[in-house]
Amino acid sequence: MNTFFSRLLPAQRGMCMVLGMVVLFTLMDVLSKYLSRFYPINLILWARFFFHSLLFIVFLGPRIGFSLIRTRRLRWQLLRGFTLAGASYCFTAGLKYLPLAEATSIAYLNPIFIALLAVLFLGEEMPFGSWVASFIAFAGVLIVVRPGSSLFTWAVLLPFVNAVLFACYQVMTRRLANIENQYCLIFYPGLVGSVIYTLLVLPEWVTPGLLHFCMLVLIGLISGASHLVMIRALKLATASYLAPFGYTQLVWVLLAGYLFFDDFPDAWSLAGIALLIGSSLYCARSPRQPGAAEE
């Protein structure tokens, strides 16, 4: 008997995968923010990258073998790994010092920076409307953090730098997408991050209790599983079709921030978040039609 999921069109199944994935991302952020009260940021990120990589090795290693690590652009792969490791540190540290919704919304400047970097380094053209959207997005950030408010501290730079570094990571990934296989592109950043944070966490290692250790493992498994889900989703629908559904994460982030940390943005912050979402969606859009599979 066919299930409801199997009766959906391919693009609709991809949409459902993304909707489920953003719930997992929200859970990962909640766990990271909670654990940052007790452990060094480096320990949380070590768990994220280590168990992420372990998941890939266990599930994909036996099936694709050395294709998981075979690369023709090793230096670029290492650079991508360092960039993602830095971006992850900035966002996780931002979660420690900022409310969940505000930190996440500032990080959603990412599509704006991708568009700008694509102009500078990939030779792509940026329409006038995208330039306008970029200025509106920065205005949205200013509304969220409001100079003079309690949020206007050095910590707001952390998700901002995360957005810049993650945009660099994605532009490099776009550059390598037609050269390297998709599993290799995802595995190397996890491997590099594992090595970096293993070295960084050793001097400040704190042995977690059983419950907290399970949470750390879960963070890494969610990170790895979400990438596998995204690979599958992109085989069912185009990135331009799926991108808007990723913004539903902010709904879950608002709810999780209120339920777990008693944080909820005020009216000004909600207005700024709305501007950020609208501007980022505009820059993330594509003239390609949705529904076609993207290999």
Image (spheres, helix red, strand yellow):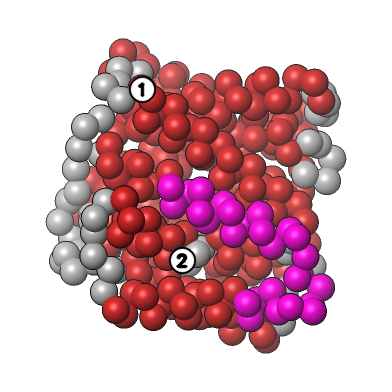
What element does badge 2 sit on?
A: loop
Q: Amino acid at mark 2?
A: Tyr
Q: Residue 247 vs residue 268: left or right?
A: left
Closer to the camera in the image, 132 or 87: 132
Asked if the magenta segment contains residue 171, the reply would be no
Any mark on residue 74, and which? Answer: 1
Which image quadrant: the C terminus?
top left
Closer to the camera in the image, 55 or 33: 33
Q: Residue 66 vs residue 270: left or right?
A: left
Q: Which residues are magenta?
A: 142-168
Residue at image x 26%, y 22%? 72
Any mark on residue 247, and which? Answer: 2
Name which quarter of the figure residue 105 lies in: bottom right
Q: Name the main secondary structure of what is drawn in magenta.
A: helix
Name which quarter of the figure residue 226 lies in: top left
Residue 75, horizontal then vertical, whole percent: 38, 25
